[in-house]
Amino acid sequence: MNSPTQCQDAASRIAAAEQPLPTPVYLRKLYWWAYEHPLAVKFWDRDFLINFILLGNYDRLGNAVLEEFPQPLGGKTLQISCAYGKLTPRLQQQLGDEAQLDIIDVLQVQLDNTRRKLQQPDERITLTQCNAAMLKCADASYDRALMFFLPHELPEPVRRQALAEAFRVLKPGGQLVMVEFHRPKWWHPLRLYQRLVFMLFEPFATDMWEHELTEYFPPELQYRLDKKATYFGDLYQKLVLTKLG
Ligand SMILES: C[S@@+](CC[C@H](N)C(=O)[O-])C[C@H]1O[C@@H](n2cnc3c(N)ncnc32)[C@H](O)[C@@H]1O
């Protein structure tokens, strides 16, 4: 598996930053206990905890991602930010022999953690420290990109930049697959509980209840919404989008 330094030599892949990236202010302030502290990473990266946080839907939402990808998966895929649990190891299993999977995250501790979960060595995969709002790779260089529960964690301006970047690096005809929170049905028995969780821990996430994710796309973007599916009383959504032009 390539290290970030090796990635710099691989012109067709994402470039590593010259120096370690600083932790974004919102992440340090709001999510240090979930993603940044080494003990937090050890504590949270357990399937049953992730499944609890996703109210028993972890496998279902992981399946929803993987069913959008061909089996075996070819071409170039960009995973925009790490995810706890077995999603990335499952993606590795789905990769074809010639496939490339580039994984970025702004936190090195998250990349190290993901690397530990993957079967190694695997030259098809790179893990590179990079900010989703400033991807260090050429325009139109990926066949597909994946965001798994990232936009709801980002302040709105960063969310807009990250989505613009995801589309910038996709080839025309390339697909972005996103799984995210969504406004639940009014009668959802866990609606109040989820709102409380957002109030306490994820202050930007209520945006997912009030707006469509597509509202955060660049106005000039040409895209097609191929699929919108909702899950668990609409509390979660999957969007599959194709970049046009
Ligand atoms: C994908 S989100 C949430 C995933 C979900 N809670 C899970 O683990 O299944 C969490 C990841 O996003 C990363 N992240 C947050 N802001 C980022 C940014 N601007 N650029 C890249 N990664 C970012 C965090 O470091 C963390 O690894």
Image: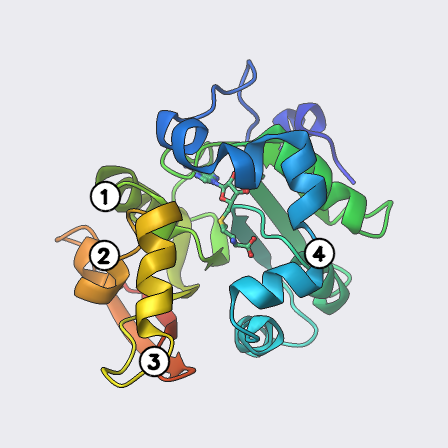
Reading the image, the residue beneath label 3 is: 234
Amino acid type of the residue tagged 1 in the rendering: Glu
Image location of residue 177, percent across then percent down: 44, 65
First-in-chain label (1 vs 3): 1
Q: Is mark 1 within 8 Å of ligand 1?
A: no
Q: Which mark is residue 46?
A: 4
First-in-chain label (1 vs 4): 4
Q: Secondary structure at mark 4?
A: loop
Q: CA distance from mark 4 to mark 2?
A: 27 Å
The residue lying toward the viewer, choosing from 51 and 193, is 193
Image location of residue 157, percent across then percent down: 22, 38
Q: CA distance from mark 3 to mark 4?
A: 25 Å
Q: CA distance from mark 2 to mark 1?
A: 9 Å
Image: 241 above or below 78 = below
Amino acid type of the residue tagged 2 in the rendering: Asp
Residue 92 occupies which quadrant of the picture?
A: bottom right
The residue lying toward the viewer, choosing from 225 and 148, is 148
First-in-chain label (4 vs 2): 4
Query: Farthest residue toward the left?
Result: 219
Image location of residue 129, percent across then percent down: 57, 30
Q: CA distance from mark 1 to mark 3?
A: 22 Å
The C terminus sits in image quarter: bottom left
First-in-chain label (3 vs 4): 4
Residue depicted at 44% across the width and 33% down the height: 131
Amino acid type of the residue tagged 4 in the rendering: Arg
First-in-chain label (2 vs 1): 1
* Mark 4 surroundings: few (<14), some (14-19) or many (≥20) residues within 10 A: some
The N terminus sits in image quarter: top right
Q: Secondary structure at mark 3?
A: loop
Question: From the viewer's perspective, is 5 left or right of 231?
Answer: right
Pointer 2 and pointer 1: residues touching (CB < 8 Å)?
A: yes
